[in-house]
Image (cartoon, rainbow, N blue to C red):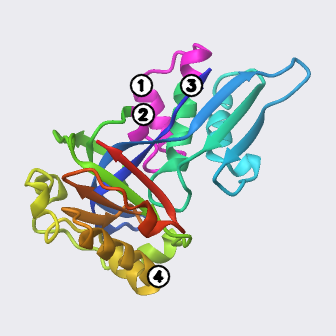
Amino acid sequence: MICFPTAKINLGLRVTARRPDGFHTIETVFYPIGLKDALDMVPAPETASYSLTVTGTQDVIEQEANLVTKAYRLLASIRPLPPLDVHLHKAIPSGAGLGGGSSDAAFMLDLLNDNLQLGFSKERLLELAVQLGADCPFFLINKPLYATGIGSTFSECPLSLSGYHLVVVKPSVSIPTAAAYKAIKPEIPAISVKDLVQTPVRDWKDNLVNDFESYAFSQYPIIGNIKQRLYQEGALYASMTGSGSAVYGLFEKAVDLSSAFESMFYWSEQL
């Protein structure tokens, strides 16, 4: 029983308010991309208990701290689950703003529900997913969506980037999310992200903003340098995704920039 959790990029990201509980409200468009992890589970021997092994490009996270395990424990607190041997192969880098951990958790919920015939509705899974992370519910839907609230309130966003070439670059640095939020002064934008993404991509450069970039570029100049290099190489639009530290560029034609970023994580695809 195997599935392939997908990554996402943020098209615009505005922090609109700070809530009394310390959380922030945002607006953004989540857009799924082809970069994927692999998640597999098989029944464990009768004498065994749940176990998780992780391979791939990532630092190993202790089993109980991994969101895949948290997804299993969450459903197990509601319905009896059998012992499982779970293997997660990581290709999506962590600390990137690409949603890898959240995607793994969401796909685990779906995998358990479908293969163990637990009978949870999509609506119930969405309610459970938000307990694991604000962006987890997106990965249960996995199509372009306009997100508001803490990032888990969705509305349709008719948008296709089909035909564009995507390049994603992540340096070795990672940005503490709490520090990034603390540095931002929330503000409701004059034009919503949802409206801006309906304009031509070549017009996004001066209008579609990620509020976390100012802090990230000041603390980690290499991130800003990546964005500048993508524009120098012909990107129509470039932006940091999430709270960083990955940066992506959208190009009209296929490009190979791997040699320009050979010391960093690099991914490209035709959307």
Foreground: 89 or 150? 89
**Considering the numbered disc 4 on the image, is that residue within a helix, a strand or a loop?**
loop
Residue depicted at 23% across the width and 73% down the height: 187
User: Badges 2 and 1: C-beta atoms under 8 Å apart?
Assistant: yes
89 lies left or right of 95: right
Q: Earlier in the sequence, mark 2 or mark 3?
A: 3
Region rendered in magenta: 112-140
Residue depicted at 51% across the width and 49% down the height: 100
Q: Which mark is residue 111?
A: 3
Q: What is the three-letter code of the residue carrying label 3?
A: Leu
46 lies left or right of 243: right
Residue extending farthest right = 47
User: Badges 2 and 3: C-beta atoms under 8 Å apart?
Assistant: no
Q: Which residue is mark 1?
A: 122
Foreground: 235 or 9? 235
Q: What is the three-letter code of the residue carrying label 2?
A: Leu
Quarter that holds the C terminus = top left
Q: Which residue is mark 2?
A: 140
**Considering the numbered disc 2 on the image, is that residue within a helix, a strand or a loop?**
helix
Q: Position of residue 93 (x, y in %)?
A: 55, 55
- The crowd level at tag 1 (other Cα within 10 Å; few <14, some 14-19, many 20+) is some
Q: What is the three-letter code of the residue carrying label 1?
A: Lys
Q: Which residue is mark 4?
A: 220
Q: What is the three-letter code of the residue carrying label 4?
A: Tyr
Viewer-nearest of discs 3 and 1:
3
